[in-house]
Image (tube, grey):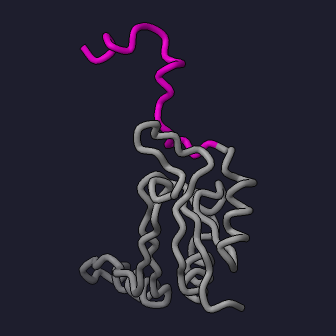
């Protein structure tokens, strides 16, 4: 397996991926059940992914992000561990965040899934009913 993977993030501003010590969280949960003071778990490692606004094709004046994604090179072991902890996350299931062994493969997958809306695209003002100038006031 490669030492790094290219992670594509289709969210506009990116996202922080947190990796937790699951054994430690389970022990904390048991202590909380026994009446100990509740302490939130702290991530053991985090990675911040660049979002679609970091795509080299992104043009701020159009704000069109469909088909775009930020690219971040991430340690493969971190990615595999994070993916195992988050396999049922909407980020993973809806291909909002995904990884491939190479940038070329990641960009190929982005071409495949990039036409599926994320739900966070900007509003197309041409499709709004009424006068856009009067909507704000």
Q: Main secondary structure of the magenta part?
A: loop
Q: Quadrant of residue 47?
A: bottom left
Q: Position of residue 53 (x, y in %)?
A: 45, 53
- The C terminus is located in which quarter? top left
Q: Position of residue 45 (x, y in %)?
A: 41, 85
Up/down of 38 relative to 62, above or below: below
Which residue is at 40% across, 87% downward? 44
Up/down of 103 relative to 34, above or below: above
Which residue is at 38% across, 85% downward? 28
Up/down of 88 relative to 126, above or below: below
Lateral position of residue 59 relative to residue 84, left or right: left
Q: Quadrant of residue 102?
A: bottom right
Lateral position of residue 136 relative to residue 112, left or right: left
Query: Magenta stretch?
Result: 117-137
Q: Is residue 108 magenta?
A: no
Q: Position of residue 11 (x, y in %)?
A: 50, 54
Which residue is at 62% across, 92% downward? 3
Could you tell me if residue 42 is visible in this image? yes
Could you tell me if residue 30 is visible in this image? no
């Amino acid at each position: 397996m490669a030492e790094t993977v290219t992670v594509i993030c289709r969210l506009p501003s990116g996202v922080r991926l947190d990796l937790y010590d699951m054994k430690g969280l389970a022990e904390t949960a048991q202590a909380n059940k026994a009446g100990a003071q509740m302490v939130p778990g702290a991530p053991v490692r985090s990675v911040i992914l660049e979002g679609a606004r970091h795509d080299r094709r992104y043009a701020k004046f159009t704000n069109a992000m469909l088909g775009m994604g930020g690219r971040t090179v991430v340690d493969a072991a971190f990615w595999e561990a994070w993916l195992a902890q988050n396999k049922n996350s909407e980020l993973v299931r809806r291909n909002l965040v995904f990884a491939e062994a190479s940038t070329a493969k990641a960009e190929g997958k982005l071409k495949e899934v990039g036409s599926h809306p994320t739900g966070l695209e900007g509003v197309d003002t041409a499709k709004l009913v009424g006068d856009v100038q009067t909507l704000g006031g």
